[in-house]
Structures are given as structure tokens and as C-alpha cells.
């Protein structure tokens, strides 16, 4: 990058018409660059204008603004919104941020009466409001997407309630489970993600408007009016807190981080499952890419990228906490740095949810392969030990020891447990009967696990039904 003259004036220098009363000169070019947020906070335009409309209505209702001025301002704000949405609005870096870009255009459209809109308001409560509304809107958009992902998982779980796969601990074959059971585990995780977002929404739903710069306003404002108009539960109790609180951004990104971690774990499993040594599932052309050199490759890029985006989201959490941790009350310009991490985290999560939903619906399971792997590596050894406990009353520790000896024997011979002869088994524990072979299949193993929350196919079919009721039942919808 070419070295810049750091004291050079920005082109079109001149004092800012929004706050330039005592300013004679314009900012240094570098000042303008470090100060401006319009490059990213233009995404707040809808919330900014909604807030201004509510504020103007309140000013009229309180007799602070005449009804005529109120109408003019309202008409102007709607026009500005149309211009932005129609792509006709010219954003200016010189005007720093979305608040001043909107207000400046409003003045061009309706003249000096535009200046009355900012009565009893500051950009400090204005930005706090805009970001709050943006986070709330974003939660309301993500919520049905997460529900959709749950619906995809439940559909597939239903379909695979009896499909046997190996369950792993330490990524070592542990016990047979069903694929449906595995998928429903993610439904629970995402259920908690949804409830964390709902929780964040409930706590953020208070209006900061009326705090003005930090201390409140000498005008006879009614913060309850704007709070109600904007769908908040009420106004914030303390004006200093109202302009300096960014807890809702931290909470949102924290909830987003955990949701992303869940998506990432599922993505990682998809990557593993569709690798050649596993071959548990296949993804279609829709969710894989080829290699430019190896014609046989089908790479699960969407899963890999979902896994990677978790890094950005968790990074956003760390970035924001670091920005906030040393700030004295109340508003500090540092807080402008909340937006890029917030937007990036939300965008990354949204993309990840959509990609995972697509992959869950797309994936084709390979039940024969899953069953073969599930049956290998003595995965029913625990069933043998449980049989010894249940049928001949051995203490579990002793049953474990006997089973271990039998696994050792089978392994020495290179055969499965159920291929040991009855006399070979009785040589280790004489009370074993032919009945034991009944429990030494993967089907018997999963079928037996009927305990609450267990993997038995009948359980899984029921759990899928219950999950539908618990998570997909008529949604309460957005409470705006
Ligand atoms: N662009 C600013 C932000 O995002 C808006 C608030 C600016 N307030 C101020 N007093 N300079 O935080």
C-alpha cells in the first residue's frame, strides 16, 4: 500500500453539517477513514428508519413536534427508505454512518424541518436501538431456519430409525446404534440453540430510546411510546446502561458460536462418513465438488466450509469481548467495532444452517456398509457381559472380565464372538448356555436398548414423533 500523508485533508473538506458548529476545517483523510462506519452499518438502514419513524410519532404525540412537521418528516423518511431499497441512494463516507447519511438525505428532501427529528435523541441511543432491532430481526430469521434443519434431521431419523450403524467413543467402535438415533442427537442440540436465541431475544427486548446522549432528555418525551411502537416490552430503566450496553450482541454471538459448534460437529461427521474408508453416506453432485487433478474425487466442500466458518463466529465472540472489556461508561466509539463481527457471525451462521439443512436432506445412507462396520470389532461384547449379569447373576465387573477373556480368544482366532463354539465359551465360564447367541447380533443389541433415551428402533421412531411435536409444533412465530 502506498504511504499516505496522514495529515492530508479529505477531499471536499469542510466541517460536518451534523455536528460541525465549532469546526472550521474538515477531517484528515485518515480520520475520515478510521471514523466512517457507513461501509458496513448501511445494513442498519431499515432499523434506523423504523426507529426514526417511531421517534417522530412520539415527538408529535408529546407536543414536541407539530403534527404537520411530523407528517413531513414521516413522508421524507419513507422516501429515503424507498431510495435505499431501490438502489438509488448515494451513501457518503463523509457522513460517517447510516444515521447521518439518512438524516442528511432527509434534509435534502424536506429542508430544515429534518433537523427537528433529532430532538431528544442522540446517535448514542439511536445506534443502540438500531443494533438491538437488527439482532432481534436476525434471531427471528434464524429461528425458522434452525427449525427447518431440525425438520430435515427428524425426517431422516424417522426414515432410518432401524438403520444400524456403529456408535463411537474415542472414534473407536463402541456399541451398535441406529442412524436415526444419531441424527436425533443433533435435533436436541439445535433445540438448545433455539432456546438460547429465544432467551437472548427475550432479554434484549427493551428499548434504549430516550436515553439520548447518556443522561436522558429535558424534553417531555415518552419512552414507553417508542418502546411500544417498536415491539419492545418496555423502555430500559437506566439511561447510562441504555447507551453503553452491548450484552445483547455478546449473547447473540455466544449463542451463534454454540450453534456453529454444533453445525461444525455434524459437518465433521459428514466429512468422515463420506470418506472412502467409511462410506457410510454419499452426498450428491449438489453438495460436492470435483478435483481438478483427481477425476475420482467428490469433495464435501460445503461441510468443510461450515466447519471452518465456526472459526469466524467464535473469533467474532472473542473480538467483541475484547473490544468491550475495558470500556468505561457510557458510549465509546470503540463500540462501533461491534458491527462487523456481529454481521459476519450472523451471515456465517445463516449460511452454515442452510448448507447443513441441504446436506442432511441430500445425503444417501449406505445401510449395508454401516451394518457391516457396526458388527465388526466386537461391538456386541457389552451385550455378552450384560447377558452374564442378567442370566447367571455375575457381578458386572466379573462379567466384564469373562467377556474380555472371550474377546481375547475370538480375536486370537480372528473370528467374531458369535463364532466361538459353546464349549469354547464354557471353558471360560461353565454356566454359559446356548441362549447367549441370541444377544450376539447387532440387531438384538440395539433392540435391547429400550431404556429412556436409548437407541432401540422402537424408541427412535417414538422419539422422532415426539421431537416433531416438541420442536416443530405450531411455532409461536415472531413476537414483534
Ligand atoms: N457509528 C456510530 C456507532 O456505530 C454511531 C454512534 C456515534 N455516536 C457518537 N457520539 N459519535 O457506534
Image: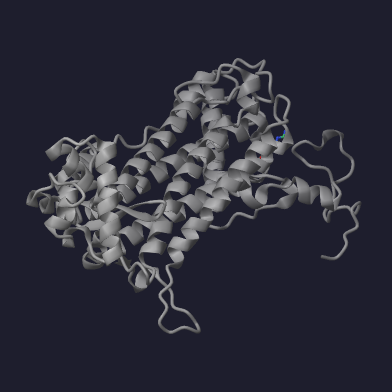
Residue at 67% x, 29% y: name it.
122
Q: Quadrant of the N terminus?
A: bottom right
Q: Is residue 339 above or below residue 331?
A: below
Query: How far across and down, in percent of the image, does residue 278 sit?
Result: 35, 67
Q: Of 301 and 22, which appears nearest the observer?
A: 301
Q: Of 455 and 123, which appears nearest the observer?
A: 455
On the rendered structure, is 265 left or right of 43? left
Query: How far across and down, in percent of the image, does residue 327 sit?
Result: 72, 30
On the rendered structure, is 415 left or right of 197? left
- For the rendered model, the colour scheme is one colour
Q: Is residue 38 visible?
A: yes
On the rendered structure, is 398 left or right of 252? left
Q: Is residue 303 above or below residue 294?
A: above
Q: Quadrant of residue 259?
A: top left
Q: Is residue 327 above or below residue 224?
A: below
Q: Quadrant of the C terminus?
A: top left
> Ligand 1 lies in which image quarter?
top right
Query: How far across and down, in percent of the image, does residue 457 sit?
Result: 16, 49
Residue at 52% x, 51% y: name it.
310
Residue at 27% x, 67% y: name it.
414
Amino acid at each position: 500500500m502506498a504511504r499516505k500523508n496522514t495529515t492530508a485533508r479529505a477531499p471536499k473538506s469542510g466541517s460536518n453539517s451534523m455536528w460541525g458548529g465549532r469546526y472550521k476545517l474538515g477531517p484528515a483523510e485518515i480520520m475520515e477513514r478510521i471514523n466512517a462506519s457507513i461501509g458496513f452499518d448501511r445494513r442498519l438502514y431499515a432499523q434506523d428508519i423504523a426507529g426514526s419513524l417511531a421517534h417522530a410519532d412520539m415527538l408529535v404525540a408529546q407536543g414536541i413536534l407539530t403534527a404537520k412537521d411530523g407528517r413531513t418528516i414521516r413522508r421524507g423518511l419513507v422516501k429515503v427508505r424507498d431510495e435505499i431499497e431501490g438502489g438509488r441512494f448515494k451513501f457518503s463516507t463523509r457522513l460517517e454512518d447510516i444515521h447521518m447519511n439518512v438524516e442528511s438525505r432527509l434534509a435534502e428532501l424536506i429542508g430544515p424541518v429534518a433537523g427537528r427529528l433529532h430532538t431528544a435523541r442522540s446517535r448514542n441511543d439511536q445506534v443502540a436501538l438500531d443494533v438491538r432491532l437488527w439482532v432481534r430481526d436476525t434471531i427471528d430469521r434464524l429461528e425458522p431456519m434452525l427449525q427447518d434443519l431440525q425438520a430435515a434431521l427428524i425426517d431422516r431419523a424417522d426414515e432410518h430409525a432401524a438403520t444400524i450403524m456403529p456408535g463411537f467413543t474415542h472414534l473407536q467402535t463402541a456399541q451398535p446404534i441406529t442412524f436415526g438415533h444419531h441424527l436425533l442427537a443433533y435435533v436436541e442440540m439445535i433445540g438448545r440453540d433455539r432456546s438460547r436465541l429465544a432467551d437472548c431475544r427475550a432479554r434484549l427486548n427493551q428499548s434504549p430510546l430516550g436515553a439520548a446522549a447518556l443522561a436522558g432528555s429535558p424534553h417531555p418525551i415518552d419512552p414507553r411510546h417508542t418502546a411500544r411502537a417498536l415491539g419492545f416490552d418496555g423502555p430500559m430503566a437506566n439511561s447510562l446502561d441504555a447507551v453503553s450496553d452491548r450484552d445483547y450482541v455478546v449473547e447473540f454471538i455466544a449463542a451463534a458460536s454454540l450453534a456453529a459448534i454444533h453445525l461444525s460437529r455434524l459437518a465433521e461427521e459428514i466429512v468422515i462418513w463420506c470418506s472412502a474408508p467409511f462410506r457410510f453416506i454419499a452426498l450428491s453432485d449438489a453438495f460436492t465438488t470435483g478435483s481438478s487433478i483427481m477425476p475420482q474425487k467428490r469433495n464435501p466442500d460445503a461441510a468443510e466450509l461450515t466447519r471452518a466458518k465456526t472459526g469466524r463466529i467464535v473469533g467474532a465472540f472473542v473480538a467483541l469481548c475484547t473490544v468491550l472489556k475495558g470500556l468505561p461508561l457510557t458510549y465509546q466509539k470503540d463500540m462501533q467495532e461491534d458491527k462487523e463481527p456481529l454481521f459476519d457471525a450472523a451471515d456465517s451462521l445463516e449460511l452454515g444452517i442452510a448448507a447443513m439443512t441441504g446436506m442432511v436432506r441430500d445425503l444417501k445412507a449406505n445401510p449395508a456398509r454401516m451394518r457391516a462396520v457396526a458388527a465388526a470389532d466386537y461391538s456386541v461384547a457389552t451385550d455378552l457381559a450384560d447377558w452374564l449379569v442378567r442370566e447367571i447373576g455375575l457381578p458386572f465387573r466379573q462379567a466384564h472380565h469373562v467377556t474380555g477373556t472371550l474377546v481375547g480368544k475370538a480375536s486370537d482366532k480372528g473370528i467374531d464372538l458369535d463364532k466361538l463354539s459353546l464349549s469354547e465359551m464354557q471353558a471360560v465360564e461353565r454356566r454359559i448356555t446356548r441362549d447367549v447367541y441370541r444377544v450376539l447380533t447387532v440387531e438384538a443389541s440395539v433392540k435391547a436398548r429400550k431404556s429412556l433415551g436409548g437407541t432401540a428402533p422402537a424408541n427412535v421412531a417414538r422419539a422422532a414423533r415426539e421431537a416433531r411435536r416438541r420442536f416443530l409444533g405450531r411455532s409461536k412465530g415472531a413476537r414483534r
